[in-house]
Amino acid sequence: MFLYSESLFTTKNNIHYFDSGEPFESKGTLLIFHGLFGGLSNFDDVIQLFSKQFRVLLPLFPIFDKPGFQSFSDLIRAANQFLDDIVVNHPVHIIGNSLGGQLAIQFFYAHPQKVDRLILTGSAGLGEQSFGITKPKRHSRSYIEERTAEVFYAHTLAPSYIDEIMDVLGTSTKLIRLLRIARTSKQTRLDSVLPSISCPVLLLWGKDDAITPPETAHLFHQLLPDSTLKWIEKCGHAPMTEHPNLFYSICTDFLQQQSNKPMKDYQYVGTNYSLR
């Protein structure tokens, strides 16, 4: 397992996060926003690959464990504070999956000077299928296994992944927070925001995604002014987990092509970035 405990840290605001450290010849910083149930393990394989060229950061927002993380304004504020806490003084590339993609778009909208490029994969925000948990009730393990299997095209889930979901569903405070953020995500459409996203965006989608189906990817592509749409065959809602090597290859090709354009030049001033 690459994500060993020595790479996990805590900010002064008590946000746990993964930090791969700066590679010898760094090509920038990758900030990863995970989905609702997707944590470190979903990105384990691609982080091993990306960390050879980039500093990789993945904050673990306590969506289920603490109040104050169940709205996008809360999460945007937390993400902004996170970058300030660890003093990232240059624009970052953001990879966002599912809910994390929706957050990535809104983070750019709120803080465009802090973002260089976006990579969205199975992003929420333009219509997604429900996971099947819409109200407080007890669900059997077999039901959860069936529902989570629909997320992937052909991928065996670790028992610990199901354990995590069962823990959330079996704890009333966590379940209430889950339903709150899921409802917020469903109600927060990105249609009016996407045309103003001026940075280059890679849309990297599983061709067999049943949660955010191909027509959702096409709509993102239509509304974003500077987007590239790429498909991964025989792949569901989590390309970074199902096809990590191909995911990495397509992402690095995109970042390399865009790197021919001059990077934005920013000066770090306190908790804000300003143009030089």
Image (cartoon, rainbow, N blue to C red):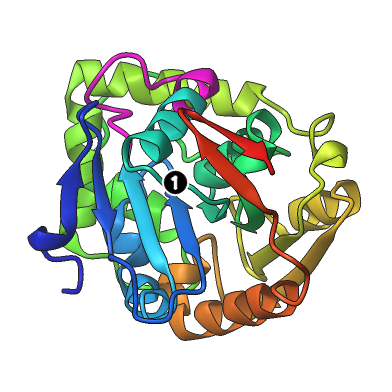
Q: Amino acid at mark 1?
A: Gly
Secondary structure, mark 1, is loop
Residue 165 image point, x, y percent:
25, 42
Q: Please report the residue visible at 61 percent of the width from the left and 27 percent of the height from the top.
A: 186
Q: State yes or no: residue 65 in magenta.
A: yes
* 44 on left or right of 106: left
Residue bearing mark 1: 35
* 264 on left or right of 159: right
Which quadrant would residue 118 be assigned to in this image? bottom right
Highlighted magenta segment, given as a residue range: 61-75
219, 211: nearer the viewer: 219
- Magenta span: chief secondary structure: loop
Name the residue furthest left: 5
| Above or below for 18 versus 107 | below
Q: Please report the residue visible at 69 percent of the width from the left and 73 percent of the height from the top.
A: 259
Q: State yes or no: residue 91 in magenta.
A: no
Residue 55 image point, x, y percent:
39, 65
How many numbered marks does the figure carry?
Answer: 1
| Above or below for 84 versus 172 | below
Which quadrant would residue 125 be assigned to in this image? top right
Examine the rendering and report whether any part of residue 75 can be seen. yes
Crowding at dot 1, Cα within 10 Å, few <14 / some 14-19 / many 20+, comes out as many
Q: Please report the residue visible at 35 percent of the width from the left and 62 percent of the height from the top.
A: 42
* Figure quadrant of the C terminus: top right
| Above or below for 68 versus 139 | above
* Figure quadrant of the N terminus: bottom left
248, 237: nearer the viewer: 248
Residue 36 image point, x, y percent:
41, 40
Examine the rendering and report whether any part of residue 124 can be seen. no
267, 52: nearer the viewer: 267
